[in-house]
Structure formats: structure tokens, C-alpha cells
């Protein structure tokens, strides 16, 4: 491998996207993925005739001009077969009132929220202004946070007067917007916002940056939207893998990076990798695109491996993201209400909320007449690490039973309704994705942590680049694809080239 080669660590959507882009640009790229399957948190697994999405079940950014659409078009690969979700989600606040449906049509959604949250239109119209200004800004591919002159030039290029107006709100939270618009007393609206924002920003309304929250709150509506993939989430990874291999990429699957060492004299890295048989492979490279959570760097780069103490401390101080506890079940479709939407969020006193995804009749996740149902809740990873095996089994059992009870009550099911039941804990996620302690979803989008104030894709180690859900703009397959595009642009600029991916507006 030459010193001009690039190693991409991690074959989730962030790593795959950056690897595919770099290979398309003619670089010699090696993608190292520890698992035998690609996809990470957006991967899938099979149990008999059932296919389950491990984590992500909805996709944003497939519409014309959306980030997946832009990148797939550039990579010259087909878009996956998908249908728009309408509603994107049905939110049940469990307060005796009907569910709140996030309709795709903006006018229908406006009517819905006027009925559901009377008097709150001023709040929604402020969110809508921010949302429009933000999307236009994001579509101009800014670099955030800024670390050098080129980053700054890209940021300035993306800014318009409307962004300067919304920019003054960068320190505000969604709860502040409620107060400014006089909607802070609407407890039902607040509960709705708290549970929806937790899904997308890891934080409740009082801790979610207004500029981030206003955007994700309108992700389900046209001209954006949330999509359901035909087959499974795996198709996203498969398509990116095809692009990477077509363009000469070298895929090391089932290979785990065990150490990264920077040689300051040559500005290169020695990367140790082991395969499933524990054979050691030594790679040498000028650049590493690292798509794992940044916390993993602390274990992979030894103390004398080149990462400064200051940067190690900065990573150590990052707020810990949540973990997930997920139920994967299968049952006869006739057991479910005929009108059950594909994606449902239910308020729950204990878990905060539970997010449910039900397979569609003909989406190939279950045989005809059957359905898969995936339900996930956020958990604190610290409550799961360091448990002895007995305490772990008993905790898993308690949480599993709580979730099943909620599902049985919601859909009027019996214990016997379930043909398949399986659960994953933060430990399972750690095993599946290698994410430390099973943290998922990236950094919380608090005003001190989002966008300009977040963790940069540039690191103090020349040639070590970060992407993935801890980097701007944050979690989700769409978010990490945006981060992958950003890091590839920065890396190419360092090498004297530029990457221009067409915009479709
Ligand atoms: C329960 C749950 C539900 C979600 N729902 C949605 C949703 O509906 N829609 C949505 O858009 N997003 C959703 N997300 C978030 C989304 O899945 C993630 O933000 C995104 O997939 C993260 O991609 P990534 O590439 O940054 O990281 P990852 O997917 O974590 O990929 C990292 C990869 O690195 C590999 N790896 C780890 N260690 C090593 C090593 N040492 N050497 C080599 N390889 C290594 C892992 O095996 C993995 O493949 C959800 C997440 C969870 C957990």
C-alpha cells in the first residue's frame, strides 16, 4: 500500500459513503469493517423468514436533492426502491387523545397541528422559517465547525442574509422558541416536542438547539420526507459497497482495526488490523477516515501514538450519548389493527417513549400474512456496563417484559401472539457495531455542542479525519452521509483537489 493510500475505518453508512466517494475520485482506498456484514447501526439481520433492521428503520434524504439522492446520483448508482412514509410517524401521547400524525403534505400537517395544538401556529411558523433557511444553507455544503481558512471560505459561501438572522438564535433551545412565541404553557405540545426531539437529537426540548430542532421537527413533510426501504435497510449499504468495488476499492470485511499509530516524521500512520482468525495485517497510510464514534480513538491510538493529551481530554469530556434497547418481534399481520401506521411513537412514563416500526405487507421483511415489529427505547449505557452476567440477564429480562407489556396493551396482543421475540441491549450494540459501551446516535444536539460548536472532522493529527454521527450535522443515515461528503471534500482540498457534487434545486 502506498503512502498516498487512504484507509477508511468502519463500514457503516458514514464509512461506506466516504469510501465510495474517495474510490470514485480515483484514490486507492481500503475500507476496514470489523463485522462480517456492512451497515453498522443501519444494518440488518435475518431470523428464519424474517428480516430485521438492526437500528435505523426510516431514511431521510432520498427525495430529489436530498443527500442520499445527490450522492447516489454522483456515484452513478440507482436509488433504492423506497416509498414515502405518510404519516412519517404517528405519535401517541397516551393522554386519552388521538395520535398526532406527521403527514407528508405540509397543508395536511398544518391542519393536524392546528387541531392537536391550538394556538401554537406562531411557534410552528417560526420553526418553519428557521427550517427553510437551514435547508437552503445545508444544500450549499457548508463546512462546520470551522478549523482553517478553507473551512471558513466554504462557510461564508453558504451563508445568506436569512442565515445571519437565524444565526442569532444559535444559543437558543426549542424550549426558548416556545417561550418567545408564548406557547410555553402548552403541556401537550411540550410532551410531543420532548419525545420527538429525543429521537432525533438525543435531547429534550429544553436542551435541543433551536436551529437543529426546528429542522428535524419538519423532516417528514414535503419537499423533504421520511422513506421506507423495500427489502431492508441493508440495500443502502449494498449499493454503496457496489459503487466502492466498481471503482477499485479494497474491502476488508471481518477485519478489525486494533491500533493506529502516527509517525510524525513521515506524516503517515501504521494501522494494525486483525482478521477473524486473529491473523495480524499491518497497513501503512497517509490518511485515515475514521467513522467510529470518536470515543473509540482513545482505545485504538496508544498513549504514545500521536494523539495529544489535550485532544484526548476533549474527547473524554464529550457528553455520553444514550444506548438503545431494541425488541425484534414477528407476528401474524391479522393480530395488528388493520390501520396501524408503519411508524409509531408512544409516550411512556418509564422509558420516555417507545419507537415502533412495523413491516409493510409487501416489503419483503416477512412472509405474506406475517409482519415484523421492531420497538426501541433509549437507555443509559452506564446502567448496562459492568453488570455481572446474572444481573445482566435479569435486567434484560425486566426491560424486555416492560416493553412487551406496552406493546401488548397498545395493540391488544397476547403473549402467544408473538412468533418470534428477540432483544438487543447496549452490550449487543457494542458487539454488533463496536461502539464503546453500546453508545448510539452521536452527540446530543445541545446549543453548546451542535453545528459550529461541535466536534470537527479535522483532528490535531494531520491525516486523521472524522465522520459519522458525532460529526456535523449529526445522526441518521442522511446526517452521516453529509458528514462523509464534508470530510471527503476537506481531505481532497488538503491534497489540492476539489469535490463538487451537483445540487438539484
Ligand atoms: C435503535 C436505533 C434506531 C435508529 N433509527 C434511525 C432511523 O430510523 N433513521 C436514521 O436515519 N437513523 C437511525 N438511527 C441512527 C443511525 O442508524 C446512525 O446514526 C447511523 O447509521 C450511524 O452510521 P455510522 O456509519 O456513523 O456508524 P455505525 O453505523 O456505528 O458504523 C460504524 C461501523 O464501524 C465498524 N467498526 C467498529 N469498530 C471497528 C474497528 N475497530 N475496526 C473496523 N470496523 C469497526 C462497525 O462494525 C460499524 O459497521 C438509529 C440508531 C439506532 C441505534
Image: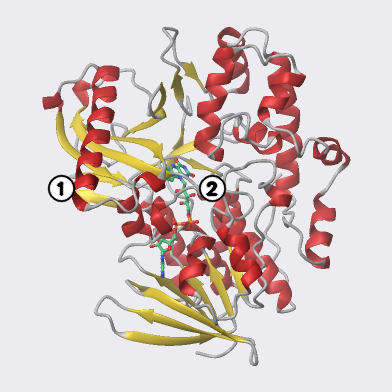
Q: Is mark 2 within 8 Å of ligand 1?
A: yes
Residue marked by disc 2? 475
- Quadrant in which the C terminus appears: top right
Q: Residue lying furthest right in this view?
A: 161
From this view, report whether residue 56 is shown above or below residue 180.
below
Judge left or right: residue 462 versus residue 170. Answer: left
From this view, report whether residue 161 is shown above or below residue 184.
below
Marker disc for residue 48: 1
Q: Residue, x 43% and y 59% (percent of image)? A: 239
Q: Residue lying furthest left in this view?
A: 416
Crowd rating for badge 2 (residues with CA inside 10 Å; few <14, some 14–19, many 20+) = many
**Label whose residue precedes the other's in the sequence (1 or 2):** 1
From this view, report whether residue 127 is shown above or below residue 133.
above
Front residue of this view, candidates 270 and 241: 270
Q: Residue, x 49% and y 17% (percent of image)? A: 100
Front residue of this view, candidates 268 and 52: 268
* Residue 465 image offset from top left, x and y in percent: 61, 69
* Residue 60 image offset from top left, x and y in percent: 53, 41
Alpha carbons under labels 1 and 2: distance apart: 30 Å
Which quarter of the frame holds ligand 1?
bottom left
Judge left or right: residue 408 versus residue 148. Answer: left
SS class, disc 1: loop
SS class, disc 2: loop
Q: Residue, x 37% and y 86% (percent of image)? A: 281
* Residue 476 image offset from top left, x and y in percent: 51, 46
Amino acid at each position: 500500500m502506498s503512502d498516498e493510500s487512504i484507509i477508511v475505518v468502519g463500514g457503516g453508512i458514514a464509512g461506506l459513503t466516504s469510501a465510495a466517494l474517495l474510490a470514485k475520485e480515483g484514490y486507492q482506498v481500503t475500507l476496514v469493517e470489523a463485522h462480517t456484514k456492512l451497515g453498522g447501526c443501519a444494518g440488518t439481520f435475518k431470523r428464519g423468514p424474517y428480516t430485521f433492521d438492526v437500528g435505523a428503520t426510516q431514511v431521510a434524504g432520498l427525495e430529489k436533492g436530498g443527500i442520499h439522492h445527490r450522492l447516489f446520483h454522483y456515484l452513478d448508482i440507482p436509488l433504492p426502491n423506497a416509498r414515502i412514509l405518510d404519516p412519517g410517524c404517528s405519535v401517541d401521547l397516551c393522554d386519552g387523545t388521538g395520535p398526532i400524525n406527521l403527514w407528508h403534505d405540509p397543508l395536511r400537517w398544518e391542519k393536524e397541528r392546528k387541531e392537536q395544538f391550538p394556538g401554537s401556529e406562531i411557534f410552528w411558523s417560526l420553526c418553519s422559517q428557521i427550517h427553510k433557511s437551514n435547508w437552503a444553507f445545508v444544500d450549499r455544503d457548508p463546512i462546520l465547525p470551522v478549523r482553517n481558512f478553507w473551512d471558513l471560505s466554504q462557510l461564508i459561501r453558504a451563508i445568506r442574509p436569512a442565515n445571519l438572522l437565524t444565526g442569532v438564535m444559535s444559543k437558543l433551545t426549542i424550549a426558548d422558541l416556545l417561550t418567545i412565541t408564548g406557547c410555553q404553557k402548552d403541556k401537550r405540545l411540550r410532551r410531543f416536542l420532548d419525545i420527538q426531539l429525543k429521537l432525533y437529537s438525543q435531547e429534550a426540548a429544553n436542551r435541543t438547539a433551536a436551529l437543529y430542532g426546528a429542522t428535524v421537527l419538519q423532516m417528514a413533510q414535503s419537499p423533504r420526507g421520511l422513506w421506507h426501504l423495500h427489502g431492508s435497510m441493508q440495500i443502502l449499504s449494498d449499493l454503496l459497497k457496489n459503487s466502492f468495488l466498481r471503482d477499485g476499492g479494497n474491502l476488508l470485511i471481518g477485519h478489525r482495526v486494533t491500533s493506529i499509530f502516527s509517525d510524525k516524521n513521515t506524516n503517515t500512520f501504521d494501522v494494525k488490523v486483525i482478521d477473524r482468525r486473529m491473523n495480524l495485517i499491518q497497513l501503512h497510510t497517509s490518511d485515515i477516515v475514521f467513522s467510529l464514534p470518536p470515543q473509540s480513538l482513545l482505545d485504538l491510538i496508544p498513549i504514545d501514538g500521536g494523539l495529544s493529551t489535550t485532544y484526548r481530554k476533549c474527547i473524554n469530556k464529550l457528553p455520553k450519548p444514550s444506548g438503545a434497547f431494541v425488541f425484534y418481534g414477528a407476528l401474524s399481520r391479522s393480530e395488528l389493527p388493520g390501520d396501524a401506521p408503519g411508524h409509531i411513537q408512544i409516550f411512556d412514563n418509564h422509558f420516555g417513549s417507545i419507537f415502533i416500526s412495523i413491516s409493510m405487507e409487501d416489503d419483503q421483511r416477512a412472509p405474506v400474512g406475517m409482519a415484523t415489529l421492531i420497538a426501541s427505547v433509549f437507555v443509559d449505557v452506564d446502567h448496562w456496563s459492568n453488570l455481572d452476567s446474572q444481573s445482566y440477564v435479569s435486567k434484560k429480562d425486566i426491560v424486555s417484559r416492560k416493553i412487551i407489556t406496552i406493546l401488548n396493551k397498545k395493540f391488544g396482543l397476547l403473549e402467544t401472539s408473538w412468533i418470534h421475540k428477540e432483544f438487543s441491549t447496549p452490550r449487543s450494540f457494542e458487539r454488533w457495531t463496536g461502539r464503546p459501551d453500546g453508545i448510539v446516535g452521536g452527540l446530543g444536539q445541545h446549543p453548546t455542542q451542535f453545528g459550529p460548536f461541535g466536534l470537527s472532522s479535522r483532528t490535531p493529527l494531520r491525516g486523521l479525519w472524522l465522520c459519522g454521527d458525532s460529526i456535523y450535522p449529526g445522526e441518521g443515515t442522511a446526517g452521516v452521509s453529509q458528514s462523509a461528503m464534508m470530510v471527503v471534500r476537506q481531505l481532497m482540498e488538503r491534497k489540492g483537489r476539489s469535490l463538487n457534487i451537483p445540487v438539484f434545486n
